[in-house]
Amino acid sequence: MRLRNFFCKLFGIKVETKDELMKKFLIVGLGNIGDKYTNTRHNIGFKIVDEVADEYKATFETEKLGDVATFRFKGRTFILLKPSTFMNLSGKAVKYWMDKENIAVDNLLVVTDDLNIDFGTIRIKAKGSDGGHNGLKDIQDKLGTNIYPRFRFGVGSDYSKGRQVDYVLGEWNKEETSLLIERLPMSAKIITSFGTAGLANTMNTFNGK
């Protein structure tokens, strides 16, 4: 350990302490890259982390497997990630950035859309199935576990039989767009609450709102 620290100092490599690592969080917004997906229901994860970045003046930079922005709040470091792998391969980007930043699975929060709950409803969970969501399915596969925090944002299920894909890849209607103005700032508060107040407190405060 001493020898490693010596070489790190010699070459100017920063060694993070255990306490610093415990205060570092990876927030992953799921979505698909490309302008045609920007305002689709499936991209609510991207939209929420964009809201957080705007509020805390964090700038996204294109990095390996995604766009990344970092900011500090109340002694915590938040790393925002928008994977560039497309939804179905989200796990590859999540695993890479967890390893790169040495993020514990408890400090990972995945933000995604959910067809199974009403539009705008918040559901934060410590674990769960993929619920048929291909992004969550790939993350579970790459991490080897379904026990990781996730923040599901309800997009509703107002579609006819067999039109699920068209619905999630469809754009928000006027009413939904108007209501998002209120829901997005609340979603940003959930992100920082996760890092500062913890998962359990965040669940108690925001679930069902």
Image: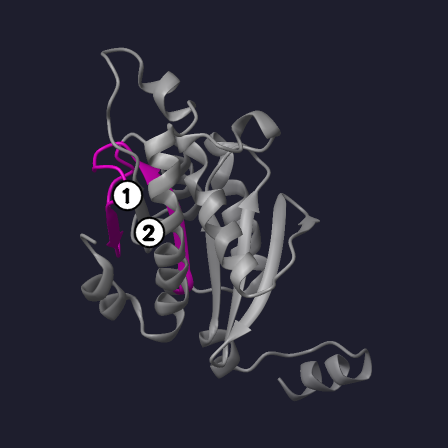
Q: Residue at x 40, y 47 (%)?
A: 181
Q: Residue at x 38, y 30 (%)?
A: 174
Q: Quadrant of the C terminus?
A: bottom left
Give the percent coordinates (x, y) of residue 127: 26, 52
The image's mark for residue 150 is 2
Q: Magenta includes 109?
A: yes
Q: Which residues are magenta?
A: 107-131
- CB within 8 Å, label 2 to label 1: no
Toward which corner of the image does residue 13 lie, by quadrant? bottom right
At numbered mark 1, what does the secondary structure look like: helix, strand or loop? loop
Pick the residue in front: 178 or 88.
Answer: 178
Dot 2 or dot 1: first in sequence order is 1
Is 8 situated left or right of 102 in this image?
right
Amino acid type assigned to the residue bearing label 2 in the image: Arg
Give the percent coordinates (x, y) of residue 14: 69, 78
Q: Is residue 165 above or below residue 88?
A: above
Give the percent coordinates (x, y) of residue 61: 69, 52
Q: Quadrant of the N terminus?
A: bottom right
Q: Magenta includes 126?
A: yes
Is 198 situated left or right of 205 in this image?
right
